[in-house]
Image (spheres, helix red, strand yellow):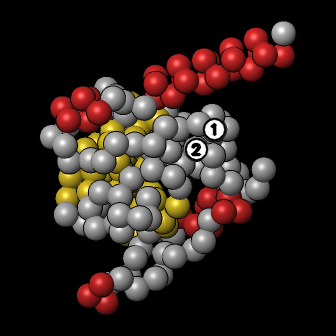
């Protein structure tokens, strides 16, 4: 009897958790029906603090799962200049460093994006192809490393069947424009640790 009670209690608790994390279809319609509904996110480990000082920007991803595609060629002969971190749609994306949300932007290529400046405003961290932003996220907001800022998706030019976070780091120019910097390969900074 206790086993059955524990089993059904676990099911109810799991269902409540999924309902709290996954927005209803009515809420999705409020966002202009642009995005497909997200799959529920199951329990994921806490973010991983890496020796580089960065936090893994996608919850539940181990550094050993990463593949360096920074120098990969893209359409028009351009270089990728970022790291694609594959994960199920709806997986939480977290701030990789303490910083400020500099710009929330939607573009043809990046889809729903976040530009975060680190505290000294030396680097910009770019998170693209998001499914949606975290509730309450706004420009000018200070975030701590590990704060949920959005969810993995396929917006912009990402293939619909390949949800991922397009993660880029750039050294800012003296003008401190969020859209302008010198690319830094995130792969060695994120891959240098394992659990």
Return the x and y of residue 100 as percentages of the image width and height.
36, 37
> Residue at 51% across / 52% down in the picture?
88
Q: Is residue 56 visible?
A: yes
SS of the residue under disc 2: loop
Residue 165's x, y, as percent?
44, 57
Instruction: Tell me the tag on residue 152.
Output: none
Q: Which quarter of the figure has residue 120?
A: top left
- Residue bearing the label numbered 1: 44
* Residue drawn at (53%, 38%) of the image: 41
Name the residue nearer the viewer: 98 or 19: 19
**How dense is the environment of label 2, judged by Cα within 10 Å: few (below 14), some, or many (20 and up)?**
many
Q: Residues within 10 Å of mark 1 (few under 14, many from 20)?
A: few
> What is the residue that sits farthest to the left in this orientation?
32
Q: Residue at x 18, y 32 (%)?
A: 30
Q: CA distance from mark 2 to mark 1?
A: 6 Å
- The residue depicted at 35 percent of the width and 82 percent of the height is 74
Q: Is residue 124 visible?
A: no
Across and down, in percent, residue 109 comes to 25, 66
Q: Nearer the viewer, residue 188 or 25?
A: 25
Q: In the rendered picture of this protein, how many numbered marks are placed on residues?
A: 2
| Residues at discs 2 and 1 in contact (Cβ within 8 Å) | yes
Considering only vertical position in the picture, is 138 above or below 106?
above
Image height of 136 relative to 56, above or below:
above
Q: Earlier in the sequence, mark 2 or mark 1?
A: 1
Horizontal side of residue 104 vs 93, given as left or right: left
Residue 125, horizontal then vertical, whole percent: 41, 53
Quadrant in which the N terminus is drawn: top right
Q: What residue does disc 2 label?
A: 59
Whether residue 152 sits left or right of residue 47 in the image: it is: left
């Amino acid at each position: 009897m206790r086993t059955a009670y524990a089993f059904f209690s676990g099911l109810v608790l799991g269902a409540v958790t999924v309902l709290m994390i996954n927005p209803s279809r009515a809420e999705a319609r409020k966002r202009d029906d642009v995005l497909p509904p997200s799959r529920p996110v199951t329990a994921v480990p806490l973010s991983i603090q890496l020796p580089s000082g960065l936090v893994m920007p996608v919850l539940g991803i181990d550094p050993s799962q990463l593949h360096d595609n920074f120098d990969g060629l893209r359409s028009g002969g351009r270089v990728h200049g970022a790291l694609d971190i594959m994960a199920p749609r709806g997986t939480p994306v977290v701030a990789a460093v303490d910083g400020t949300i500099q710009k929330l932007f939607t573009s043809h290529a990046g889809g729903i994006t976040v530009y975060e400046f680190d505290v000294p405003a030396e680097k910009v961290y770019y998170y693209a192809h998001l499914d949606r932003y975290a509730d309450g996220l706004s420009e000018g907001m200070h975030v701590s490393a590990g704060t949920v800022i959005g969810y993995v998706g396929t917006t912009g030019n990402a293939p619909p069947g390949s949800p991922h976070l397009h993660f880029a780091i750039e050294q800012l120019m003296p003008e401190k424009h969020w859209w302008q910097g010198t690319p830094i390969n995130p792969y060695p900074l994120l891959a240098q640790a394992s659990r």
